[in-house]
Structure formats: C-alpha cells, structure tokens
Amino acid sequence: MDVKVLALLALLTMVLYTPRYTAKPISLVERCWCRSTLHTVPQRSIREIKFLHTPNCPFQVIAKLKNNREVCINPKTKWLQQYLKNAISKIKKSRKRSD
C-alpha cells in the first residue's frame, strides 16, 4: 500500500476515536441558568425539580415539566416554600429515627 494512503487512514482513525470532551468552558459553567423565573407553574405538570446553587447566582429552582420543557421557578413561590419545608422536616425525622 502507498505510504500516503496509510498515513491518511491512520489520521482518520485517530480523529474518529479521539474522546470527545463534554466539559463546558468556565465562563459557561459560572453563568446563571435562570435569567427569569415563573411564579405560576401547575404542580401536576412538573416531573422533576432540580435545585442549583452556583457561586455568583442566587438560589435557582429548575422544573422539568411532563412535556420535557425546563422552566425556572421563583424560589419564593408559596407552594415551593411549603414543599421545601416538608422535605426538610421529612429528612430531619428520618435522621432522628436512625440515631
């Protein structure tokens, strides 16, 4: 085989099998996810809730809805405050039982 063809095949093999890095640049990691928040999100439409705390951003609550859309919820929403209180008290009770 020709040396040029072998070199090209080796180069293509290296490019195809090089691991892809999924890490984001620092400037994107430190950016706040929630630039605006919603006050009214029906609880029954929420599939999952994530809480984010990044150094330069306020406390952020991201809800994944049943239609796979992600929205930011205002952390001061009454039902969310009650949800957090219930979750914290449930954790405290389970810790007291295990002690």
Image (tube, rainbow, N blue to C red):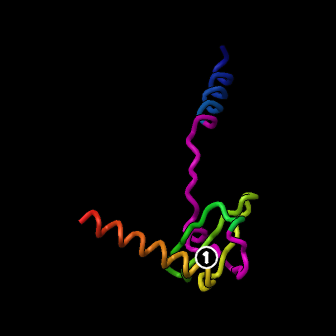
Report the residue that reaches farthest toward the right: 67
**Secondary structure character of the magenta stretch overall:** loop
Instruction: List x then y, in percent, for residue 49.
Output: 59, 66
Query: Where is the N terminus found, in terms of image quarters?
Result: top right
The magenta stretch spans which residues? 15-43
Closer to us: 74 or 58: 74
Q: Circle 1 sits on which residue?
A: 32
Helix, strand or loop under label 1: loop
Can residue 61 be seen in this snapshot? Answer: yes
Picture residue at 57% right of the left edge, 67% below the top: 50
Can residue 36 be seen in this snapshot? Answer: no
Q: Is residue 26 magenta?
A: yes
> Which kind of residue does numbered mark 1 sit on?
Cys
Closer to us: 21 or 39: 39
Q: Residue 47's quadrant in the figure?
A: bottom right
Q: Residue 70's quadrant in the figure?
A: bottom right
Closer to us: 35 or 29: 35
Instruction: List x then y, in percent, for residue 79.
Output: 61, 79
Q: Residues within 10 Å of mark 1 (few under 14, many from 20)?
A: some
Instruction: List x then y, in percent, for residue 25.
Output: 57, 64
